[in-house]
Image (cartoon, grey):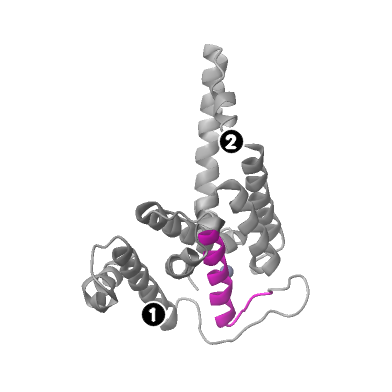
């Protein structure tokens, strides 16, 4: 599946499933923070497994984030050096040991995934558990949504011809052979994902009434997303 389909289905899955986990697992209970956390988490979870491919949307996005962080860190260190301040240290001390450890787990999981090749380690159940736990340590409000988005990515990849090695490194790739990336089914899933996500966000924010108003929100959103 293409990156945008993984994002759309990841967000829709997170919006549908993650609220069931509720406050005990860190999902915000207020409507607006919850919608933001689920959309953001679903996007990240939907993209993360494909950071094992340099040309993927997830890998390109990750590279941009790292590049921006590297530039900002270098700029802060230079300012600190010139002015004799300790801005970088102050910023770093804003993160707890638990959050830094969670970030390290996520980065290490992605790095092993990259080293093991496309649809290797990053498409396994172990990677799903590691990323879910790492994000839970790093940023609890989006953790369940990231895990659900990640799981939706693995489930989608099972449906196409290459499949995924869920028990990596053991066993053969599991593959249902139903769809091909970039074909009609891929586009259909993308449109359905966008429509479902837009409808669920609009319903939660009470911008519209019950689900029966699908044509008023879901389909226009899907049509607008098509050229993307
Ligand atoms: Zn994938």
Residue 152: say if magenta: yes
Q: Is mark 2 within 8 Å of ligand 1?
A: no
Residue nearest the viewer, comparing 169 with 207: 207
Give the side of residue 111 with respect to residue 214, left or right: right
Give residue 105's position: percent from left, percent from top. 68, 50
Q: Which residues are magenta?
A: 144-165
| Mark 2: secondary structure | loop
Extreme residue toward the right, this view:
170
| Mark 1: secondary structure | helix
Q: Residue at x 62, y 79 (%)?
A: 163
Vertical position of residue 200 compared to residue 98: above or below: below
How busy is the neighbourhood of tag 1: few (under 14 within 10 Å), some, or many (20 plus)? Answer: few
Q: Tell me which corner region of the image, top left, top right, bottom left or bottom right, holds residue 197.
A: bottom left
Disc 1 to disc 2: CB gap under 8 Å: no
The residue singled out by tag 2 in the image is: 95
One can see residue 120 in this view: no
Q: Quadrant of the C terminus?
A: bottom left
Q: Which of pointers 1 and 2 lies earlier in the amino acid sequence?
A: 2
Give residue 113's position: percent from left, percent from top. 67, 60
Vertical position of residue 63 compared to residue 155: above or below: above
Give residue 172's position: percent from left, percent from top. 73, 80
Q: Residue at x 24, y 62 (%)?
A: 207
The residue singled out by tag 1 in the image is: 188
Give residue 54's position: percent from left, percent from top. 58, 58
Extreme residue toward the left, this view:
216
Ligand 1, seen in the image, is in the quarter at: bottom right
């Amino acid at each position: 599946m293409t990156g945008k389909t993984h994002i759309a289905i990841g967000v829709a899955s997170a919006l549908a499933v993650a609220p069931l986990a509720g406050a005990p697992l860190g999902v915000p209970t207020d409507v607006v923070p919850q919608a933001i956390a689920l959309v953001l988490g679903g996007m990240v979870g939907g993209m993360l497994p494909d950071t094992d491919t340099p040309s993927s949307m997830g890998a390109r996005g990750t590279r941009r984030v790292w590049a921006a962080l590297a530039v900002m860190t270098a700029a802060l260190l230079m300012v600190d050096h010139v002015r004799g301040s300790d801005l970088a240290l102050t910023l770093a001390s804003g993160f707890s040991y638990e959050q830094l450890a969670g970030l390290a787990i996520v980065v290490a999981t992605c790095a092993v995934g990259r080293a093991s090749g496309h649809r290797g380690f990053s498409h396994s159940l172990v990677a799903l558990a590691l990323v879910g736990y790492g994000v839970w340590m790093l940023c609890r409000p989006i953790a369940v949504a990231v895990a659900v988005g990640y799981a939706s990515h693995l489930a989608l990849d099972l449906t196409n011809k290459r499949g995924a090695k869920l028990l990596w490194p053991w066993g053969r790739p599991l593959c249902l052979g139903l769809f091909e990336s970039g074909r009609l089914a891929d586009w259909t899933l993308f449109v359905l994902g966008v429509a479902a996500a837009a409808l669920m966000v609009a319903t939660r924010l009470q911008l519209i009434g019950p689900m029966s108003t699908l044509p008023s929100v879901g389909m226009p959103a899907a049509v607008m997303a098509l050229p993307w």
